[in-house]
Amino acid sequence: MRRLFAGLAALVAASLAYAQPAAACAGLIGPNGAVNLLRTTTFAGYHDGVEHYVTSFQFAGGSGQFGSLVPLPGIPTTVERGGDWTLQRLIRETSPLKLLRARDSVGPQGAAFAAVEVLQQVKIDALDVTILKGGGAAVGQWATEHGFRLPPDAPETLDFYATRSPIFLAAVFDADAAKARGQRVGDGTPVHVTIPTANPWVPLRILALGKAPSDRVEADVYMLTDGKPAILPRPGQQGIELDHSAAATASLLNDLRSDKGMEWIPTSAWLSKVRVDAAAIQLNYDLAVDASGRSPSRVAAGLERPFSPVTPAQVPNQTAVLLGIATIGLGAILLLRSGARAVAR
Amino acid sequence: MKRILIVVLALAALAASACASASAASPRQVGIRVHYSRFEPSRVEVRAGVPITFTLVNDDPIDHEWLIGDTAFHARHRAGTEAAHGDRPDEVSLPPMTTRTTTLTFATPGELTFVCHFPGHEAYGMAGVVVVRP
């Protein structure tokens, strides 16, 4: 059985000290706690048990540094610069008119903390990417010690992810370095993360990090799977809409395959575009995908907690219950014995 | 996990000591845990004129603070720019995963609130109340 897919794209961002409002392709938290929300577009493909995740960190001007934290479903084998046109080509596939208008108007686009394990560090243009392994608190402390200014909902959100996968991608975007490299406002740095995983999911809840409950979260997630997938939450519910669902055209697959690092694209596949448009308070789930079209995991969607052993806080209660049961059992045995003696007499 | 257990036990010990002295008056020691950017408990009752030692456990990986006072005090701090506190018993900075203690004596009965004034934290729910009984 082939269970699949997902990819993701959620970038959350937590600003680094003294950061100015530049951006990645998701919500950013500015130095004063204000949130600048940009629409997120990412691509997640799943083929042969490997998830390919491509997103772009957009340079929006300003100076200083910006950070983003992205939960991942597994340990990446590679983190590299993504191809230049994958995301744009996907947008054109599902909304060609929009792209023409945009073209006309825009013109041509140019181990700090013991419990955290740093698995990989990569520099991509003006972006420093670190792959971390650790619990929510440990990753949060690592981020804090590395200048991230995490919002108040970060501790709970990081734990929400760490219970399912302790792998996080921390990206620091150096706006000054971007300027020095000649990057202009609007230029993106695509990043391609390759993740072998049997249980992929697309993190969405993290897009609401640092937002006020009524703030809107908007994101487009493109998914390429071997077959028509089933997703959870169901489209039409909880701010999730399925904008596109069809067999991928040969021209799209050929174009994608010709981009850097995209040789893995199969000769046939199913293209889905999921649009997220939800209030931050509503976005308490992730996107679970089963490419076989059967039943996506409620745990992968964050709708149920994964099974875990007894937590320390539960021990006293359970011990008390066990002691109670033992006492009742012992009392019952004594009563039976005394009753048996009485009968014997 | 071990840390959580220690924190739970420490707070339980504080609660036990608080209960022990409750028969005499009010607790002289109060444990408050910061978890997921919330104070636990968020309501505490104490007796006026008695020195109260607060043990503040920040179980979160982010910075918090515990500032206690009246409405005017908090209005001042909402607009304040101090990055850290430390030399006043009613203003305590709580770095990630740390424990701090502070001792206060409340002269008059009434209600005071304790709040974390980091950006967005109060709106998120990081506030509590100390009820001072006569």
Image (tube, coloured by chain):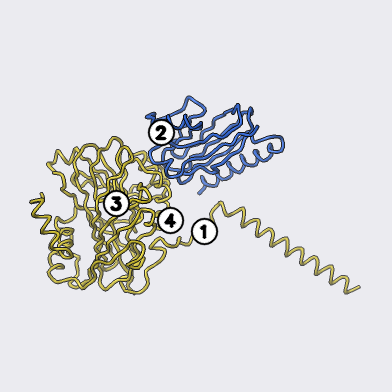
Disc 3 and disc 2 in contact, CB within 8 angstroms: no
Helix, strand or loop under label 4? loop
Query: Which shade of the palette goes to chain A?
Result: yellow
Which label lies toward us, 1 or 2?
2
Q: Which residue is mark 1?
A: A309
Q: Residue at x 51, y 31 (%)?
A: B70
Front residue of A214/A40: it is A214
Is residue A74 something that shows in the picture?
no
Which chain is home to disc 3?
A
- Which chain, by letter, is blue? B
Q: Nearer the viewer, mark 4 or mark 1?
A: 4
Q: Quadrant of residue A103?
A: bottom left
* A64 left or right, relative to B56: left
Return the mark for residue B78: 2
Please tell me which residue is depicted at 31% across the width and 52% down the height of the picture: A70
Contact between labelled residues 2 and 1, with CB atoms less than 8 Å apart: no
Question: At which x and y percent is residue A314?
Answer: 57, 54
Q: CA distance from mark 3 to mark 4?
A: 19 Å
Instruction: Give the percent coordinates (x, y) of residue B100.
Output: 51, 33
Amino acid type shown at disc 4? Thr
Which residue is more in the foreground, A337 or B80? Answer: B80
Where does label 3 land, which residue? A11
Task: Report in which chain the residue with disc 1 lies.
Answer: A
